[in-house]
Image: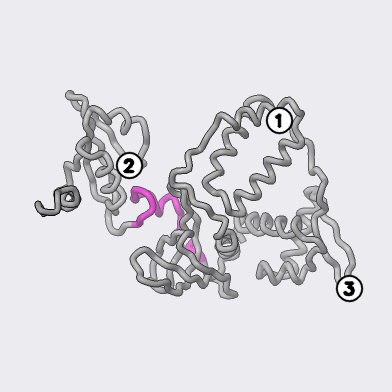
Amino acid sequence: MSDHKQLFRQWLLLRRLASAHRGYTVQELADQFRVSQRTIRRDLKVFRDLGFPLESQVGPAGKQFWRLRSGEDLTRITFNTDEAIAMALLKPALEALQGSFIYDAAQEAFAKIHALLPESVSQYLQRMASVIYATPIRRTDYSPKSEVIEQVWIGLEESRVLQMRYHSLSAPRPRQYRVHPYAVVFHRGALYMVAYSENHQELRHFKVDRILAVEVTKQGFRRDPQFNVQKHLANTFGIIPGSGRPQKITVRFAPQVARYVEETQWHPSQRCARRRDGSLDVTFQLTNTEELKRWVMGFGPRACILRPKALREEILQELQAAAQQYLPARSR
């Protein structure tokens, strides 16, 4: 088992043990995580060796129950000024994951860190946090999806097939899917699961918001050892996958927005070239143009596709159709 899978499991296992009132038996934990008792015992030994406040007690029928003692500090933490500022900057960035178990665990961690800090440093952090704000645009509330996210996480960690009920934008009603989860991608305030779909016999992207129910099955799968999520998304302008060889796309931006476009890396393949009149030509290498098209159209008359010709004509048709929506009814 790879290191990242082991760490995922151990993180989830620690969460279970920390929230347990009476604790869990090794068999119960093995059943929950679909691993052997030997694996669970090995994880418990790792926790003990690292100094986690792990305890066991004998319950009914002589069964041994394991849990983490609450209210104990693992260690004393000290921060210098730069580190304290970094913590203040990091907390608002997690607001986009509000409602997920990742967010909840992070908030608990922040609270514990504040409790360990000297009062003066804690107050300083709170002042810093009060002047940093993450806008709520494109923010998703994942509170109703906490169980879904956890099931997806377990499927990723254990390489288990997921059985899920999913309602795509293009489908009139939800469908059942069997998928092999490969990665989770955070894109524009939303979570997406990259997974091999048995229904489609190919890799697909599933927005977590649209997963209505999911169950980790007992069936495992062999994850493609060559898969790399960064390479998988390298030729997309966001999250919509493409196929075939990347094509070169050139966009011309007017002088009014040239500096705004230039100061941000919108895609790893972008190349910028200033023109004498102050306009900017930007090229991209992409296999899917849908998200790029929306982005360019958002600039209105200050951006124009130069090539390829087919994409230019496609946008022209969409702009003409959009203009019709603004004409008086008698003119249509």
Is 2 left, or right, of 198 in this rendering?
right
Give the image location of residue 155, x and y in percent: 57, 65
Q: Is the residue under label 1 in contact with that under label 2 (CB below 8 Å)?
A: no
Circle 3 residues within 10 Å: few <14, some 14–19, many ≥20: few
Write the residue at 59% across / 31% down: 130
Write the residue at 69% across / 46% down: 108
Instruction: Residue 258: say if magenta.
Output: no
Identify the colour scheme used. one colour
Write the residue at 63% across / 56% down: 8
List the residue tagged with mark 3: 60
Snapshot quadrant of residue 74: top right
Badge 3 element: helix
Give the image location of residue 157, x and y in percent: 59, 61
Circle 1 residues within 10 Å: few <14, some 14–19, many ≥20: some
Q: CA distance from mark 2 to mark 1?
A: 43 Å
List the residue tagged with mark 1: 122
Give the image location of residue 141, x and y in percent: 52, 52
Image mark for residue 269? 2
Residue 177, compared with residue 275, is above or below; it is below
Residue 213, compared with residue 102, is above or below; it is below
Amino acid type, callout 3 = Pro
Is 302 left, or right, of 241 in this rendering?
left
The residue nearer to you, when weighing 253 against 195, is 253
Q: Magenta region: which residues? A: 223-241
Residue 207, compared with residue 36, is above or below; it is above
The residue nearer to you, when weighing 118 against 56, is 118
Badge 2 element: loop
Q: CA distance from mark 3 to mark 1?
A: 44 Å
Which mark is nearer the camera, 3 or 2?
3
Write the residue at 35% across / 30% down: 263
Amino acid type, callout 2 = Ser
Snapshot quadrant of residue 77: top right
